[in-house]
Amino acid sequence: MTTATQDIDSQTQDDAFVGPSRSFAGGVHPPEGKHLTEDRAIEPGPATKELAILLSQHIGAPAQATVKKGDAVAAGQQIGECKAFVCAPVHAPTAGKVKEVSLLPHVVLGRAMGVIVETESAAQPIAPAFRRPEGFDPGTYTPEQICEAVRSAGIVGMGGAGFPTSVKIQPDAKAPKETLIVNGCECEPYITCDYRIMLEWTEQIITGVQLVARACGARDVFIAIEDNKPKAIEQMSASLQKLNLSAALRVVPVKTKYPQGGERQLIRAVTEKVVPTGGIPPMIGVVVTNVATAAAIADAVVHGRPLTHRVVTVTGWGVARPGNYYVPIGTSVQALIDHCGGMTDDAVKVVLGGPMMGIAIADLSTPITKTGGAVMVLTKRQIGTDRFEQRQTACIRCGRCLQACPENLNPTRIAHAVKNNLMDLAERYFISACIECGCCSYVCPANIDISGYIKTGKIFLARRKKKMPS
Amino acid sequence: MPQDITVSFAPHIRRPLSTQRVMLDVLIGLIPLVVAAGIYFRLRALLLIGVCVVWCVATEWVSNVIRRKPGSLGDLSAVVTGAILGLSLPPALPFWTAAIGSVIAVGVGKMAFGGLGANIFNPAMVGRAFLTASFGMLMTTWTVPAPIDANLPQVGPENIMDARTQATPLSWSKIAIKDENGADIYNERQFLSTVTGNVAGSLGETSAIAALLGGAYLLIRRTIDPHIPAAVLLSAFLFAGIAYLVNRDAFVQPFYHLTSGALLFGAFFIATDPVTAPLTRRGMWLFGLGVGAITLLIRIVGKYPEGFMFAILVMNGLTPLIDRLFRRVPVGGKPRVG
């Protein structure tokens, strides 16, 4: 019980205090749950007959299908092209035949266009070996070459947001990107895919980081890892030392706290700089990229491989054999869960992502995308709807959500404003500055879905703005 | 394979701390005060607290039935209100008076506003204020605590003490203020009895040790933030200290002000009522400073010997304004409107 009441970080930021420790103010300490899968090496995922590849796996314009029903596709062939600037192409993970180009279940959009590929041979996917060239020098590539390779490989931020990486890393004379932070925090409980990559694909990540630093011209490069992953910190430091890169690339242990891996929180922890509200990191000369993205960049630039596979953690108490799997993008959640021994009898919720920010899905045929690092199956006990404790009471204004909010907002007031449809009031409480980390809902003793109200309020506001002429 | 899967917004896990548990922690924190009340005022004290709890719970139940709302007794907030009201009453108060106070506390102080979380004023203090205004005589009849040790000193000149009732330490200090003489009747031994609780007063307020023990539990459990109690006690000490420095004959030493009356009990258990206190840390400090200052203002200048209850009610009323004054600004600054 003691730990349960003490997991809000005592350091709050009413006074805008940002301490010298490598962390940020606010945040919470949910149970980590990493022990389920952290020692499970990356294994090949399920062999599937069908892959459903969405054309919208990123922020920005959807890709346009370049294949049609009946076409034969080769492994790594581009099947969706992009014309817009903020966009990423998609590729076929394996050779096969296009079964259909149609609307498919999409975790965020509900339904979106995608390509269903019937695979040629139902074989388990095997991660191709990455070989770091002897005496690798990122200087042999020009920034333009790197950006172009990243763009044509369809690489997007694999940590969750899915912003096209080539847009993010390209040099900008007006706003030079001086600092590169590589995000290996994995602050979301239960997920271990980035951790396993850091242990098993260390050199590939380092190569990718060097390429990104070369592309965006960053002088300071930090690899931030939460201090609950000492093995990853050790391994990364040792590899850097072996490659004689310790001076250029620094490993920064950061405090284990959710949402340490949130872009704005991580920047604050590592550089003590603050990204303006509503702004983006390049405004203060910072680029943040995820370790999995860095690994994909190395693969794309060095070996010319497009982003067609990723590591997914399948975890939670509701799945029989949790683990980390290398799977082709387009594998259905159902296939993954079946591969892990299926769901237990008390499983009640399937979440794409982690327990704090993941999205619960109703349709298990939803495919894995480039951004989805985890499938989590929760049990009745974890959700606990049958206990009085978990029922909602009125807000007792205890202020725990204020203390937990990493953006120094007043979540309970925003939630009440949205509940009463007072959207102007919600804006006066800076609803748009919410990063939707869910800390407020997590700590609420009244069990109010504060972040749910806030997310709903943001949708209301977006709709209202759309209707009003600007 | 399960039959159904559910969907909802993230996060999908919750901290196992409920409103019920918060209230239960407050009740656990109150145990030392109830024990102290039982020691000094015997069975009657426990019965009086029991009457308040029963009537508070009953009022909430009836009010839920009338308003056709789902039952809310499980959140234990009515029990907390009853216990705090009971502990703030004089030991000899008739049970029927306590029952009226309980009905007013929960009925008018809480349910009339819409129940838990919606009230502006601390319900227990609303009930007590009603009783003070309506039954002034009964509310100022203070029983002599049962002597646990005949050698322990009593506060005040002993020849004025009668067999049943006795003035509270703060009443004596009030007389000293009026006479501008006699503040020095307090000595260390008498200070000690305000610490242990062997003085006349409301059930829960006499023992400083019990209040500190209960408060420490709440702080360790993080049920309350330290800011409000710290602000209340700091500001009370400051104002008492200033008065003492101005006139040592009329005003008692500042430590007496902290250990006498409802200050310690209230700083930990009443001022920290989350519903009626500000949300932000700065707001909490302003709130606490206000409570301490108004309490001392009434004690030193006002008509009543004790002013904690009024101080709480005044600052409760100001809480919405305080929250507006200290609006939180996002970490990245105010967004540019565009």
Image: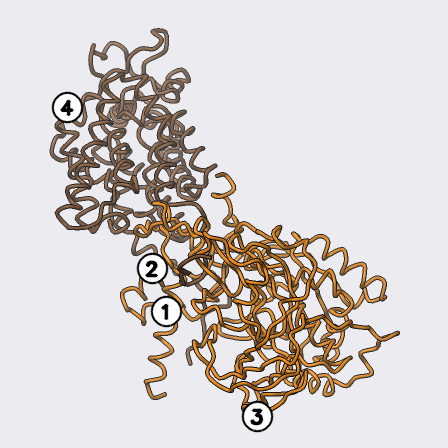
Residue A177 vs residue A459, the one in the foreground: A459
Three-letter residue code for mark 4 = Pro
Q: Which chain is orange?
A: A
| Mark sitting earlier along the chain (1/3) | 3
Secondary element at tag 2: helix
Residue count near mark 4 (Cα–Cα under 10 Å), binned few <14, some 14–19, many ≥20: few
Which residue appears at 57% of the width and 72% of the height?
A331
Which residue appears at 30% of the width and 23% of the height?
B169
| Mark sitting earlier along the chain (2/4) | 4
Q: Which mark is residue B94?
A: 4
Mark 1, mark 2: which one is toward the viewer? 1
Three-letter residue code for mark 2 = Arg
Residue B251 at x, y percent in the picture: 33, 28
**Mark 3–mark 2 contact, CB under 8 Å?**
no
- Label 2 – label 4 distance at C-alpha: 42 Å
Residue count near mark 2 (Cα–Cα under 10 Å), binned few <14, some 14–19, many ≥20: few
Instruction: Return the residue at label 3.
Output: A83
Residue count near mark 3 (Cα–Cα under 10 Å), binned few <14, some 14–19, many ≥20: few
Q: Residue A456 carries which label?
A: 1
Secondary element at tag 4: loop
Which residue appears at 15% of the width and 50% of the height?
B68
Q: Which chain is brown?
A: B
Q: Which mark is residue B324?
A: 2
Q: Would you say A116 lies left or right of B111 here?
A: right
Q: Is residue A104 visible?
A: yes
Mark 3, mark 2: which one is toward the viewer? 3
Residue B83 occupies quadrant: top left
Three-letter residue code for mark 3 = Lys
Mark 1, mark 3: which one is toward the viewer? 3
- Label 4 – label 3 distance at C-alpha: 84 Å
